[in-house]
Image (tube, coloured by chain):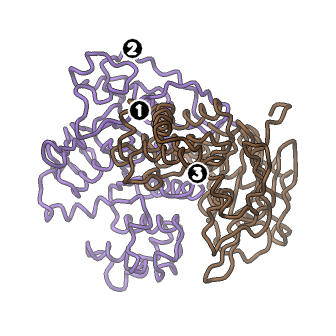
Chain colours: A brown, B purple
Amino acid sequence: MSGIHPAHVLAIRGLDVRFRTEAGEVTPVRGVDLDVFAGRVTALVGESGSGKSVTSLAVIGLLPRPSGGVAAGSVAYTGKSGVTVDLARTPASAMRAYRGSEIAMIFQEPMTSLNPVLSVGEQIAEQVRLHMRLDAAAAWRRAEDMLGLVEIPDARRRAHDYPHQMSGGMRQRVMIALAMSCNPRLLIADEPTTALDVTIQAQILALIDQLRKTHGMGVLFITHNLGVVAEVADTVSVMYAGEMVERTDVRTLFRAPRHPYSQALIDCLPARAARAADGRRLIRAIPGSVATAFAAPGCRFAPRCAFRDDACEAALPDLREIGEGHVSRCRRWEALA
Amino acid sequence: MTPPLVSVHNLCKRFGQPPALVHAVEDVSFEVRRGEVLGLVGESGSGKSTIGRLILRALDPSEGDIAFDGLPIARISQRQMRPLRRRMQMVFQDPYASLNPRLRVRDIIGEALDAHGLAPGKARRARLATLLETVGLEAAHADRFPHEFSGGQRQRIGIARALAVEPDLIIADEPVSALDVSVQAQVLNLLQDLRRRFGLSMLFISHDLDVVELMCDRIIVLYLGRVMEIGPAEQVCRSPRHPYTQALLAASPRPDPDAPRVRRLLTGDIPSPLSPPSGCVFRTRCPLATEACARQIPPMIAAGHDHAFACIHADAVPPSALPEATGDDIR
């Protein structure tokens, strides 16, 4: 990381999200700290049930109501005006003004996020009419421009197309055009390329990267794919079972991870398998699977961890700063060095 | 000489009627050798799953021949196919959709045994216990229902069901794509163990090049229903000759932040299989395409032992200067 810190867009501190269910209260996210800076990409990595998507829904105020909500912590967002607000304490009615114009989101499956009965041009035009107060003609021109910006060939004609007339890759471009149409300061991308073929994924990642550079927005990129993380991220936060376990710059994460889960996650990639004497290429798999109920108060990774001792299961370890910009929630991080 | 376990010759599968005729598989030929794991890799619409289903005769081929253990099976009846089904089994992608939620594990696996009259009566319980332990589960799991298991455990049940009838060939269609990476690693290790233990041959279908390279002896790269390249896994992944294979490798994100990012992106989308391009099907996205590519379907050109590719610009394709993709040197 360079000496001068870019401006904060998002600073999450001590976030707990709670859901009331028939089986009682659950905390799918607890103690999350997360930063996103202008013009930078923060990747949020984790497997299913890690809480990465719930964290992003908490940021934009889309947790299911009334069963879910932020139980503790703050979500400081610094907007276009330079004023910082705590989104966790912003009423739902006021949140609506932020979504779309300040904070935009793209999801894994563009087909379910787009309106099937409006042409793609109308969907973008509608959004810019609402948020940028443009008249109909100007809004339509803006829609055409945005479709051109995301490199949809023959954009002026394709603006009249409906989502079902487009391929998955084109629909994801439309989602990005829609997200970018009001010049957001923060883009939340939740597995935006997971449903796409790799050659199309490469195009979409390059597009997001180019827009980040030209528009200077901060990106919160949620993914389970470590290859994509290596490709897009500046800093990475790793989540496991609802807890943030490590945060560092992308190079340090891959070269010197200091949480046993991050290390194990990198080691179990097929590309890192070692060849055994008998020709098998065995992967260092993580034993077991993510538990869904936690009896012990301690570290949630402890039952699968090669480094655990008794104290690990006694109490939840704190996030500790172990280097510049490097945070780990492991008591035994020094054993990994 | 013993014939290869599976041999496929000029296989074609088309769905529908003109003008809505989908060219799913076109003129595909290959062999699955005894004891080998052969990978079928490609993006959506490449025909990889259709080929697996054609070999199982879950679909009827439009043209071409399939032989299983020397026996022609492309046009035999489903009744004649039945005894062969015991010898070829499928492992599916989605462990949530491929197990009957109303059956206990013992009945899910038991169905496979009953269908072929195996392990009747008292032998059943012991056979179930052995099978479950073989895939890393416990004998006591036989009495549970699928919803009581995690995704990885369910995939193990699916594998136990396939193994129950002692098949010669396993067709695994994206067997780890629905699993988290940490669980994916466990299942890939298990499949490698079982392959060695039982001398299984496998047709391994996947879109993930890293997984295919890890699991397979040889790889076939498919695009829009046609074979682009075939060869030993290491050669195809380290020195790909077809421009599509090269593009596919270049587009796959590598888990190394210092890996070179300069890459030639393929432009455009995969064309519709309703109207595949004339000549070489890849030409509409190929950086090397010329007018000649539209005129003829490129023949397979040998590129050394066991390695061939379908591109008329053979000499123009440099053995790609891809950096080593081992990962061993990352740290």
Badge 2 sits on which subunit?
A: B
Q: Secondary structure at mark 1?
A: helix
Is residue B190 positioned above or below B311 on the image?
below
Q: Which label's residue is closer to the chain start, 1 or 3?
A: 1
Q: Secondary structure at mark 2?
A: helix
User: Can you tell which of label 1 and label 3 is closer to the viewer?
Assistant: 1
Give the distance between the C-alpha atoms of the residues marked 1 and 3, in whole angstroms: 25 Å
Q: Residue B33, located in which quarter of the rendered image? A: top left
Badge number at residue B316 = 2
Q: Could you tell me which quadrant the N terminus of chain A lies in? A: top right
Residue A315 visible in the current orientation: yes
Are labels 3 and 2 on one chain? no
Is residue B283 positioned above or below B135 on the image?
above
Give the residue type at disc 2. Answer: Ala
Q: Residue at 63% across / 52% down in the picture?
A: A284
Q: Which residue is mark 3?
A: A190
Percent x, y of residue A43: 67, 46
Q: Which residue is mark 1?
A: A155
Asked if labels 2 and 1 touch by Cβ distance under 8 angstroms, the answer is no
Badge 1 sits on which subunit?
A: A
Percent x, y of residue A152: 43, 33
Q: Is residue A131 left or right of residue B221?
A: right
